[in-house]
Amino acid sequence: MYAEFLSLTDFRSYSQLDIALEPGATVFVGPNGLGKTNIVEALGYLATMSSHRVSSDGPLIRFGQERAMVRARLRRGQQGTAVEMEINAGKSNRARINRANPVRARDALGICRTVLFAPEDLALVKGDPSSRRRFLDDLLVSLVPHHSATRSDYERVLKQRNALLKSARASGKFTDAHRSTLDVWNQHMAVAGARLLRARLDLLRQLEPHIARAYNDLTDGSKAAGARYRSSLQTTLSDDGSAESGVDANADDLSALTVDELTSRFMDAFQSQQAKEVERGLSLVGPHRDEVELMLGPAPAKGYASHGETWSMALSLRLASYYVFLADDETAGAAPILILDDVFAELDTHRRQRLADIVATAEQVLVTAAVAADVPDTLQGRQIKVAAGSVSVDE
Amino acid sequence: MYEGAVQELIDELGRLPGVGPKSAQRIAFHILEADPEDMKRLATSITTVKERVQFCEICGNVTEEATCSICRDTRRDPSVICVVEESKDVIAVERTRSFKGRYHVLGGSINPIAGIGPEQLRIRELMTRLSDEQIQEIIIATDPNLEGEATATYLGRLLQSIGVTVSRLASGLPVGGDLEYADEVTLGRAFEGRRSVSS
């Protein structure tokens, strides 16, 4: 798909901005701090209802205003769709599709699909396990919308169970009443956890070959990239912590287990971890403690990869999610819009060229760069100059 | 900030459920402008409710006497009990006019975040009723959310050993609705709880 028109009202630094867009590559060029990223961020927001830069919606609204509007016209094959998103401070957002009556913002999910590359992606490789879990869960929800319930059900049951463990710890004594209530939450968390885990394992299995392929395409192919899921079911099963070795975890393969089997595995783990969980007042087993380990050759990418390798790995993850989108829906015009925010300045010439060659095949690519020369010729299609609060097209 | 009594009234109103600061202010000024007789009646009804209304000794429903009208009603089937979270759920089930048994109001659901465990609910009273009366069936009608389901699971386990029939309300598609308007979660549940049409 591609966006043919984008309009921002009171979004970030813009009071009003209208841009006509075209399929193919478009490069937004301009000095730092003038709002290049704000433009692509708006399109990313339409796709995911969240910004890649901030976790709350507040900063998206121009300072001193009450609401921001993002409007876009998207073309998917022959079909055009107009989406309007009203971002409200402290109220829920509203969306309008094709000028019909406003609906809940989440009903507009899936109309606009994007894959966004940004310098923040380095955290996918170097950051906490939580950033990799979020990467997986976000992709899961955008591929299969009903998994947003899988995710929120689990988060809610986890909160309740943690509250119970915490209050049991605070009371100083783990009573029978605590135990019988905990049993109930164990059962609910095991079911919710097993569903989420099963969904993540399936997604990672789809992603993995694409990660390897993307990494190979971006580099000279000297190292093989891979990803493996490390469940807290595998790593915390023994009480003394001695089983936290990689050998046991590999031998214990979860990927073939059904939701029911995973549920009973969780129930067993809750039993064996009970003393520890009560002592710490915290849930120690579950998808919220899992890790996606990214591998480069035999070693984990985190800690072992060089800066350049880390970048290639982060880009490979994004490219892999692009490939998964392509495989998920093969109809013409279903391909997501690629957004590359300030990525090229961070890469060496070699990687720049390879990345450009790959993304140039997409239906629409939006690139932001402070210096036009950073962007390889392959992507030098249409250039839009961004100055303070306005843009001008430079063919 | 308003002075004295007005601000006090706004603050008190603002503490009610579902009333924000703006609504509290609006209601306060409505009271100020309204007929004094009307407002006196409102004040009296609030005091009366607090003085007279208590909870039924048997089922925990609201009543003005020791036991509620449903528990006193001899025509009701004493062998079936419907377990609900709140008194307002009793009214909801009563509206169906199809349930002829009696009720048991728990006073909430198991919710560790709010500090509510089984001990804070009227579960002990339910167990006492089970040992005294000739109850054969329990219908658990807690809310179909996480906390309500957890409460249902807890009760289910507790009642398992006693030898009464325990059932849980079905969840699924709303009657008279359109399939296309059902959200993913409800539709997913409806799939799980599907039943055979061949009888």
Image (cartoon, rainbow, N blue to C red):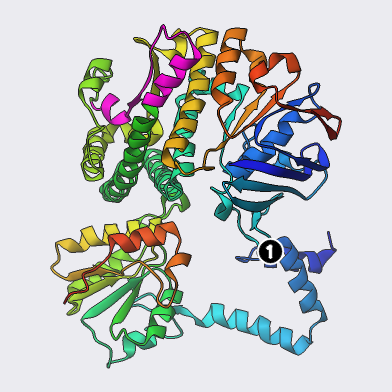
The reply, left or right, for residue B67 in relation to residue A311 is left
Where in the figure is residue A76, as x and y percent of width and height? 58, 46
Image position of A330 (left or right of A66): left
Quadrant for the N terminus of chain A, please: top right
Residue at figure coordinates x 78%, y 50% from the top left: A66
**Residue A220 is one of the magenta-drawn residues:** yes
Q: Residue at the location (67% across, 15% down)?
A: A345
Q: Check disc 1 and report its element: helix, strand or loop.
A: helix
Q: Nearer the viewer, residue A306 or B139?
A: A306
Q: Is residue B122 visible?
A: yes
Out of A339 and A307, give the one closest to the viewer. Answer: A339
Is A305 rendered above or below residue B38? above
Which stretch did the figure color magenta?
A209-237
Q: Amino acid at mark 1?
A: Gly
In the rendered image, residue A238, in percent from the top left (x then y), is placed at 23, 25
> Is residue B185 found inside the magenta-colored segment of the image?
no
**A335 displayed left or right of A178:** right
User: In x, y percent, where is residue A166?
Assistant: 41, 40
Count of marks, rendered view = 1
Quadrant that contains the C terminus of chain A: top right
Depth check, front residue: A80 or A312: A80
Residue A141 versus residue B48 in the image, above or below: above
Residue position for label 1: B14
The answer to whether residue A291 shows anywhere in this view is no
**Which residue is outermost to the bottom?**
B75
Residue A356 versus residue A334 in the image, above or below? above
Quarter where residue A62 is shown: top right
Which residue is painted at 42% across and 64% down in the image?
B108
Vertical arrangement, residue A313 with respect to residue A323, above or below: above
In percent of width and height, residue A291 lies at 39, 26
| Chain letter of the residue carrying label 1 | B
